[in-house]
Amino acid sequence: MEFKQQVAIKVTVNGADIRAAVAPEESLLDFLRKQCGVTDVKCGCGMGECGTCTLVLAGKVVKSCLVLAAQADGREVWTLQGLERDPLAARLQDSFARHGAVQCGFCTPGMLIAARGFLQRSPQPTRAEIREALSGNLCRCTGYQKIVDAVWAVAYGDAAEQERA
Amino acid sequence: MKTSIVGKGLPKFDAWPKVKGTVVYADDFAMPGMLYAKVLRSRYPAAAILAVDTARAKASPGVKAVLTAADVPNNNLRAKFGQSTDVGAQFEGLYRVLAEKKVRYVGEPIALVAADSEQAAEAALDLIEVTYEQLPGVFDPVEALKPGAYCVGENDTNAVSRFKIRKGDVDAAFKAADVVIENTYRMPFSDHAYLEPESGVAWIDEHGVVTIRVSTQVIEHFRTVAEVLGVPHNRVRVIGTWVGGGFGGKEDITVESFLALLTWYTGRPVKLTYTREESLLAHSKRHPFTIRNKIGAMRDGRLVAAEVELIADAGAYTYLSPWVLLYSTVNAAGPYNIPNVKVDAVAALTNNPFSSAFRGFGAIQPNFAYESQIDELGRQLGIDPVTIRELNCLQKGDSLATGYAYDRELVLGELAGRAWEALGPPREAGDSPVKIGRGLAIGMMSYGRLTFLHDTSRSYVKLELDGSVLLRCGVPDLGAGQAQALCQIVAEELGVPMDKIKMYIADSALTPLAGTSTATRQLYMSGNATLKAARELKDRLIKKAAALLNSSPADLRLADETIADATAPDKVLPLKTVVGHCSSDGDELYSEAQFNAPFTTVPVSELITGQTFADFTFGAYAVEVAVDTETGEVTLEKAIACFDVGKTINKLNAEGQLEGGGAISVGYALMENLMVSQGNLQTRSFTEYLIPTAMDLPDIGTIMVETESGIGPYGAKGVGEPSSNAMAPAITNAIRDAVGARITSLPATAEQVFTTMKFRK
């Protein structure tokens, strides 16, 4: 059987149209990191287990190591760096920093994308729901608590967060 | 001591680029013309290498270099593993860059490839032909220590090191004891599972300096790399990146020597990043231990004797095993005042993955054993968990098992009591198969390195002409806020806002060497060095201001970018003005200060006595668990950490250490098991090696007691590693409380708990 050597794709990455030729087996993650210079998506495992490569593809939160670059053809990709003017992303970023939700920071971009997608769907979550929503994104440093605090504070405001504490 | 910036939970300065996703981690970096490296690793745990044929790989398209042991100028070093002090042969080991003649573990590096692309490098690995002859190997440390056992290395013994403690007469004390409890405890290999796999980029700069930009806890490895290449130390420079998690796993050399060799041979920049599977295969593990712990006590609960035997699996190479073993020896009997103590510890080579540093470093394993034992003792005597510990725990002035009298503030009983109390009223499970139980455990662990290592750190503080501050310190930042703490100390001393401080870290050529980000030493060591440098500048500023204001230096205060006379409200000068005057007088406002830890002499025999560590951090965890008696599944429902942190430098970061240290040990207690069968790693991904997710953990309540009795800046103690202590036994003690099953082997998976319940006598 003959395999195509290259697939021509057109992807919108963080608002910029990119035309490229990719190998059929190339992941969206590799394409972004190696061909597009988009490095806020990280590779912690390459197998969909850790969530450090989480991004938004065609409006859905996905792990980009599990998506082929070719599958992104004709679609929009947003990573954390592209969401500079997104108000919800900005509030989450500020909240993560202020709540000490960032230690080594390697899981942070993916965690923020996951948290943003979750709050868009569920703006008034319980702490248990936040934990469940983030359970596809591993963090080895924080024990997740301050991450949950940070997401909670965005949903309910800092005063509510202090009230809970 | 009253402080204004120190102690505050300010967001750390590196949090902002981290939340923006703009921090350039090791693999995010690239150089023009960069090659990609791959490592060929051993398929077998024990085999002779008869031949390595690289001809086909070298001829493969895009391949620029294929290196084997024969290409390494110095492939075998008697290594001190990052120590700068010469402490003798019993603490050294072999650092071998690439396998030669014999492989010792699955995953041992044999050859290196650099090629134009990752694919080309990967393809070339398949073309390297290694002719092996499989050897029997040995996979259990007890077997490895028997006479006639297969020898893992080139020596005629597998024993890496032995240590012992002798205090009083344990035999007589056991005879006199009313209660004797003896159990054997087992702990598995565990993996650091940092989310950033090992990575770096190396190049040769225009002056011929091999420069390695790498994710590491130890930039001082530049010296070892220079020795591997056979060049002077000053021809290798290590630039440490912001580390994507370390926990001890990036304490030993990872990719540095490979990168240096490949860039040296090709003259081109080279990148090497491990895959997750490769990371699990290639880097160190936490030592599995088998610990036989026997304690004797009187009917009133007082401990009279402890006898502890520890056997550690060092895996295939020495690395930090002697140090870990020494820690485990000193910690074997725990933070208890026991008149008669006997400890025997041994570490042995096997053909398993090599063991080395992991948060808790030899303190965490004996802690599981002694805290299970004391819990059993309390149960047998009908004494509650807090009281049995209060009765026996170290008090100020008591001697450790080594005979060293601990003369600093010590409030262990209070820590245990407060943690226990904070659990609040217990949850009623009602009439259901789910049983609720509570457990308590305390712990001690040193911060700072062994005192005979003559540890030092340096830091450089400079006041700019506009009153802004430049801080340079060779500290690698692993995410714990190592850099932020130093900035807060400078801000406190110089009265400068945080946003006017810029800090440079972790460059072996350009920042003063601060030593390793290991052993919970950076806040203590570099914190003290930075405090000293800042205070030196402060003294000079005050002296100058006193002259300008005609004030007494004792009355002057530095705050909010001004120097003011506390006794005369009109006598105030902007900091900038004073800096300007100093500059005009040729008094350049910079200071590089060194802090020296207390020094002791090197142990001359296996018998460990006296002071081994400068200080310890003490703490307690109290937890509540729910155990499903039908499945054995354990859910951690409540957890409280109560630690004497000495003095909080950054509240958020200190809490973060307690929460994260607790969380990592919830994994140790309940799920993490790096399975190795006959030397073969069975858990090669996060699907098999499970670490806690957000759903596996409850909130951990943190209580930070500030005795200001530490020897860090402002009386601070280190909490990074100590915080991972005591959580695991608290959980297994709670399981015991819930269902009567004493877990003696970690992890307490559902299967383990169910089986223990079922076969309980």
Image (cartoon, coloured by chain):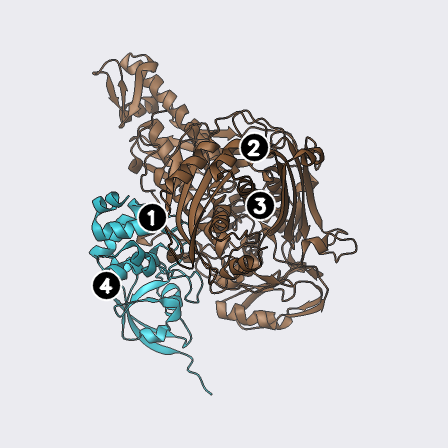
Chain colours: A cyan, B brown
Residue drawn at x 27%, y 72% as measured from the top left: A75
Disc 1 is placed on an element classified as helix
Query: In the depicted view, which residue is nearer to us: A146 or B231?
Result: A146
Disc 3 is placed on an element classified as helix
Query: In the depicted view, which residue is nearer to us: B206 or B443?
Result: B443
Q: How many numbered marks have been drawn onto this rendered protein structure?
A: 4
Q: Quadrant of residue B266?
A: bottom right
Label 2 – label 1 distance at C-alpha: 43 Å
Q: Nearer the viewer, mark 2 or mark 3?
A: 2
Query: In the depicted view, which residue is nearer to us: B447 or B756?
Result: B756
Q: Quadrant of residue A87?
A: bottom left
Residue B478 appears in the figure: no
Q: Kindly identify which residue carries mark 1.
A: A146
Q: Amino acid at mark 2?
A: Asp
Question: In the rendered view of the protein, which quadrant contains the N terminus of chain B?
Answer: top left
- B133 left or right of B435 in image: right
Label 2 – label 4 distance at C-alpha: 59 Å
Query: In the depicted view, which residue is nearer to us: B184 or B364?
Result: B184
- B569 left or right of B354 in image: left
Circles 2 and 4 on the same subunit: no
| Disc 3 chain ID | B
Q: Which mark is residue B126?
A: none
Q: Kindly identify which residue carries mark 3.
A: B369
Circles 2 and 3, Cβ within 8 Å, touching? The answer is no
Q: Which mark is residue A121?
A: 4
- B433 left or right of B571 in image: right
